[in-house]
Image: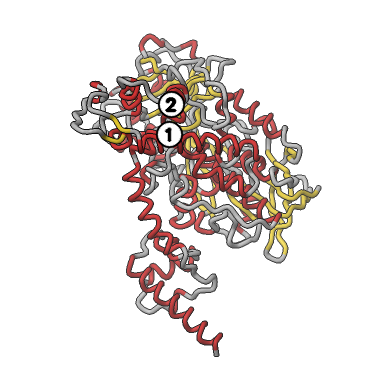
Amino acid sequence: MKFDIIVVGGGHAGIEAAHIASKKELSVLLITTHIDMIGHMSCNPAIGGVAKGNIVREIDALGGLMGTIIDRAGIHFRMLNASKGSAVWGNRAQADKNLYKKVARQEIEQCENIAVFQTMVVDIMEKNGSVVGVKTETGEIIKAKAVIVATGTFLNGVAHIGLSHFPAGRTGEPASTGLSESIGNFGIKSGRLKTGTSPRIDGRSVDFSRLSLQPGDDNPWPFSFFTTSVPQNRVACYHGKTNALTHKIIKDNLDRSPLYSGKITSTGPRYCPSIEDKVQRFGERDGHTLFLEPESLENREFYLNGLSTSLPLDVQQKMVRSVDGLQKARILRPGYGIEYDYFQPLQLKPTLESKFVNRLYFAGQINGTSGYEEAGCQGLIAGMNAALTIVQEGDMVLGRDTSYTGVLIDDLIMKGTEEPYRMFTSRAEYRLLLRQDNCDERLMPKAFEKGFISKDKFEKRLKAWEKKRRVIEWLGWSRIDPSECCDATGQQIKNRIRAAELLKRPSVSLQHIIGCIEKRKEDPGCQEKELVEELSQNRYLFLSVESDVKYEGFVQKQLNEIEKMRRLEETVIPEEFDYGSIAGLLIESKVKMDTVRPRTLAAASRISGVTPADISLLALYISKQRITRSFHVKQ
């Protein structure tokens, strides 16, 4: 067998990588250990959340699948932080995990250029510094021009339940052995990380009347820009709380926990800790919130979010039954911890290509991240770049000012990670620019230019952006009289004021402005009627216009900062640059910059531990080198 690109792994990273690469008319082979598990949600069956929801929208804007899949497979939708500014909104959907897998597989099988093969890869084949294919557990050699490794938690995975442990990529599936050692033979350094899941509960054994109901939104927002129907809420979620008895059970059994008995030595996720860690680290709390989330419409299985644990089954049963409403609850599947190999992302280029082997790419949890969304966006970028390299059409590198995806990848390759990396809005310094409502405007032109978005889809969004431009222009010149100002705004205005200026006031919404215009003694003009009607009927346009106007001043400040940083981005550091030759540069900075090999001064400035003084020295030496070279050329 011979293909242009091989994707190893059928999880969320692998799906996106295979799908997007196939859009360049290349032959793609998706290798998975179990075809029926393509797109499986091994942890909680949910997509999105604060910052994570932005990533899903970015994947969609770049031509990816995750937004489309969750819109079809979602059964409970909520917009988090909806009472706050739109810059921190986060769409989140509970998925029917069985339907999610089905839809994911359907999407892959609809791509004629993608072949799927069930086997296990044990070796990466390389020749003259470039990847040439893979070798399977049965000795089959499959040739390829590029390989994307997206194996999740499967590399030398070990699952832990109490003091028992066994090889597994996740419960019920074998670990991948051999591949990690093969990659290590190239000089690529690996480490060990840990993650875990919560027990699944039989919903028939739960007293829901003693838990708090968490309904979905009345009018849910879809994730994909191209979903035309409104998603439907078909289930409810519930939440409860641990208590003093729960905490006592945990503390009394810490000697049986692999985390505290020394069985697990690797680092777990700081921002999604196990219940054992929560009780130990936050001992002053009288309880921790738990969410009971349905896993599928086909059964009564619930995921007990917030109770991630690797304690023995008998202890898990006691813990669960100590929670009000769960006194008679039965565990269908115990929670477990899992340790696995990952490869330090400092060894990657911004394209997610290895610095050690050409055309070998890494995406997802293998790079030290956690979460379906973080994996998906990496798979997308790796797939894009593998395809673009083969067809010789440049690369796709996203900056920190363009997307959360760009922030994530830059953090990984510049700073590395020693713990599972999770995306937060606080990681993005330009988050007022990186809102859910403008992902299409930020990223779709880039995807269209590279051939990953169809002309029809792009032109539809162009029309939407033109409508938005017209509305914002109108708000800029339309004036509100004091007699027209709605009482609901609570604003006292003495003179006529531009609608856009009034809208910038904290307590004024775009709905208030529409009300003011509709209150006019003289009927609004035809254009105003048309625009007001459009805003009233199109909530996407409404949100995007309101956000752009309200954040305009803050956004302009961030754009000025970006322009300053762009000057540093334009200063390219030669690939062969000798950092050891710079007198006065901190030794730590020399070592880190030599390891990371940043492409620009801006990238160098983002390396942890590198100081502004180091950057000034580096800029001076680069400038001197250029002057010297220019002089020699003239001579």
Residue 535, disc: 2
Does residue 3 appear left or right of residue 95 in this picture?
right
Rendering colour mode: secondary structure
Does residue 217 appear left or right of residue 557 in this picture?
right
* Image position of 577 with respect to 393: above or below: below
Amino acid of disc 1: Val
Residue furthest to the front in view is 522
| Residue 474 drawn at (x, y percent) | 40, 35
Amino acid of disc 2: Leu
Relative to the observer, which residue lies in front, 486 or 529? 529
Relative to the observer, which residue lies in front, 66 or 490? 490
Please report the residue visible at 48 percent of the width from the left and 23 percent of the height from the top. 303
Disc 2, SS:
helix
Q: Is residue 501 visible?
A: yes
Marks 1 and 2: in contact by CB < 8 Å? Answer: yes
Relative to the observer, which residue lies in front, 210 or 59? 59
Disc with the residue nearer the chain's start (2 vs 1): 1
The residue pinned by badge 1 equals 471
Q: Separation of disc 2 and disc 1 at Cα?
A: 8 Å
In the rendered image, which quarter contains the C terminus? bottom right
The crowd level at tag 1 (other Cα within 10 Å; few <14, some 14-19, many 20+) is many
Disc 1, SS:
helix
Please report the residue visible at 36 percent of the width from the left and 55 percent of the height from the top. 561
Relative to the observer, which residue lies in front, 464 or 478? 478
Q: Is residue 312 visible?
A: no
* Image position of 628 with respect to 565: above or below: below
| Residue 223 drawn at (x, y percent) | 51, 30
Rendering quarter of residue 547: top left
